[in-house]
Image: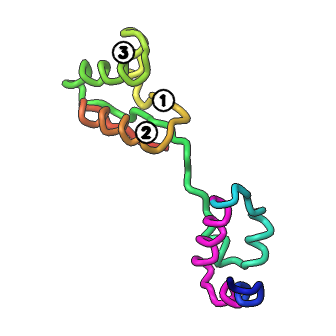
């Protein structure tokens, strides 16, 4: 087992990106969270760029549709949202409109793919 001094020397030799990865591993392993303002202030501006959080919630927006494929887009909107026929039709005809808000990345990408395949153009925000 390494001594505390050996561990400290090893940490001192890490790059900023390696240090950020180490902090994440420690947080995951021990179920703790490092205070971001303290870590950024101690590591400097280079670490601030590396500590950018990945977005976890997305909004799926139907920005436009192919008029010839409007019925297919309405069907997909109904499937994705659970809306009734009239509500889904109004949403599609009123594009750009929000289809779903606060969904995870994987679900948002799947929804976008379905809408694009049906003849709509969807964006993630």
Image quarter where the N terminus lies is bottom right
Q: Position of residue 8 (x, y in %)?
A: 73, 86
Give the quarter of the image for residue 7: bottom right
Q: Is residue 39 magenta?
A: no
Q: Residues within 10 Å of mark 3 (few under 14, many from 20)?
A: some
The magenta region covers: 9-28
Q: Which residue is mark 2?
A: 108
Residues at marks 3 and 2, CA–CA distance in whole angstroms: 21 Å
Task: Point out the residue furthest to the front here.
Answer: 1
- Mark 1 surroundings within 10 Å by alpha-carbon count, few (fewer than 14), some (14 through 19), many (20 or more): some
Count of labels in the image:
3
* Pointer 1 residue: 100
- Residue 68, image x and y in percent? 19, 24
Between marks 3 and 2 in the image, the one whose residue lies nearer the viewer: 2
Q: For the residues marked 3 and 1, what is the alpha-carbon distance in whole angstroms?
A: 15 Å
> Of label 1 and label 2, which has the lower sequence position?
1
In this orientation, which residue lies closer to the viewer: 114 or 3? 3
Residue 27 percent location from the top left of the image: 67, 61
**Nearest to N terminus: mark 3 or mark 1:** 3
Q: Is residue 18 above or below residue 66?
A: below
Task: Describe the element under mark 1 as helix, strand or loop.
Answer: strand
Q: Are marks 3 and 2 in contact (CB under 8 Å)?
A: no
State yes or no: discs 3 and 1 in contact (Cβ < 8 Å). no
Give the labeled residue for mark 3.
Answer: 89
Give the CA separation, mark 1 to mark 2: 8 Å
Name the dominant secondary structure of the magenta segment: helix
Query: Which residue appears farthest toward the left when viewing the image?
Result: 68
User: Label 2's element?
Assistant: helix
Which residue is painted at 36% across and 10% down in the image?
A: 85
């Amino acid at each position: 087992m390494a001594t505390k001094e050996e561990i400290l020397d090893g940490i001192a030799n890490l790059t900023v990106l390696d240090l950020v990865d180490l902090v994440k591993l420690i947080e995951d392993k021990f179920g703790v969270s490092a205070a971001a303002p303290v870590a950024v202030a101690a590591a400097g501006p280079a670490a601030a760029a590396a500590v950018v959080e990945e977005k976890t919630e997305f909004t799926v927006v139907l920005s436009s549709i192919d008029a010839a494929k409007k019925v297919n887009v309405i069907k997909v909107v109904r499937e994705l949202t659970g809306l009734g026929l009239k509500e889904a039709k109004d949403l599609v005809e009123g594009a750009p409109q929000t289809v779903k808000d606060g969904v995870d990345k994987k679900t948002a990408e799947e929804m976008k793919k379905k809408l694009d395949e049906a003849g709509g153009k969807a964006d993630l925000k």
